[in-house]
Image: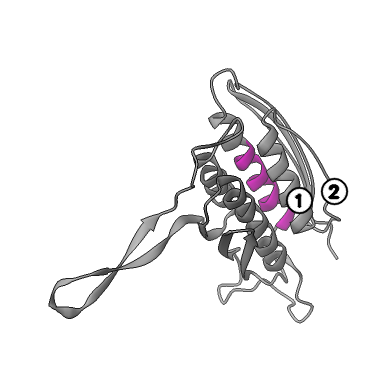
Amino acid sequence: MTDRTAAVSRETAETDIDVTLDVDGDGDSTVDTGVGFFDHMLASFSKHGLFDLTVRCDGDLDIDDHHTVEDVGIAVGEAFAEALGDKRGIERFADRRVPLDEAVASVVVDVSGRPLYEFGGVSGSGATGGSSRAQRSDGKFSQPYVGEFTSTMAAHFFRSLAMHAGLTLHCEVEGENAHHEIEALFKGVARALDDATRIDERRSGTPSTKGEL
């Protein structure tokens, strides 16, 4: 199997980040972002996706956690894109539902090369004339913070990851506790990415009628 590893560094006026990734790892991680709950989520992402991951981030936490979480998402996304290369032989598609106590996360991913991120669900709403119409609802978390971590930044992390890894990523979550909701999402995305990036030995090329992703 081709070595699917990457090392990415990103330095701006707001953050200084180093990331290493082995897609075919054992789930080992070393993470230090300065945000305890975010470190916990990245370690969980590594463990449940069986990705070996190191993340070091020195960010402007004196302002808030926004730049740290966003830029780590960018760097981890870039690392996936680099490690997967031409995506030859991968499964490409995957979906997972992951519970954590009362919370349930649903994740669908296509390692498509066409970045798109949706967080929320589709709910039915009554319409006149006896018909019903579905409308998209934005995803929400039950509490605004988990420790020093701003809950909405979880969705922002996955948007940054999807945009820079070239993923079509659809996520939904429901529950009553933001810690559980966010952790279920990180585990769900990890499991779906592990499935989608696995090598299918029946494939000799890139899984697309275009010949490339």
Range of residues picked out in magenta: 72-84
Question: Could you tell me residue 17's position as x and y percent?
Answer: 69, 31
Question: Could you tell me residue 167's position as x and y percent?
Answer: 57, 58
Q: Quarter-wise, where is residue 34 in the image?
A: top right
Residue under label 2, please give it.
Answer: 28
The answer to whether residue 47 shows anywhere in this view is: yes
Q: Amino acid at mark 1?
A: Ser
Question: Viewer-proximal residue, 168 or 201?
Answer: 168
Disc 2 crowd, CA 10 A, few/some/many (<14, 14-19, 20+): some
Picture quarter with the N terminus: bottom right
The structure residue drawn at horizontal position 76% and vertical position 70%, both measured from the top left corner, is 199
Question: Viewer-proximal residue, 57 or 201?
Answer: 57
The structure residue drawn at horizontal position 61% and vertical position 72%, both measured from the top left corner, is 211
Looking at the picture, does residue 41 appear above or below residue 200? above
In the displayed structure image, the side of residue 88 where residue 24 appears, left or right: right
Q: Are marks 2 and 1 in contact (CB under 8 Å)?
A: yes
Residue under label 1, please give it.
Answer: 46
Q: Quarter-wise, where is residue 64 in the image?
A: top right
Disc 1 crowd, CA 10 A, few/some/many (<14, 14-19, 20+): many
The answer to whether residue 114 shows anywhere in this view is: no
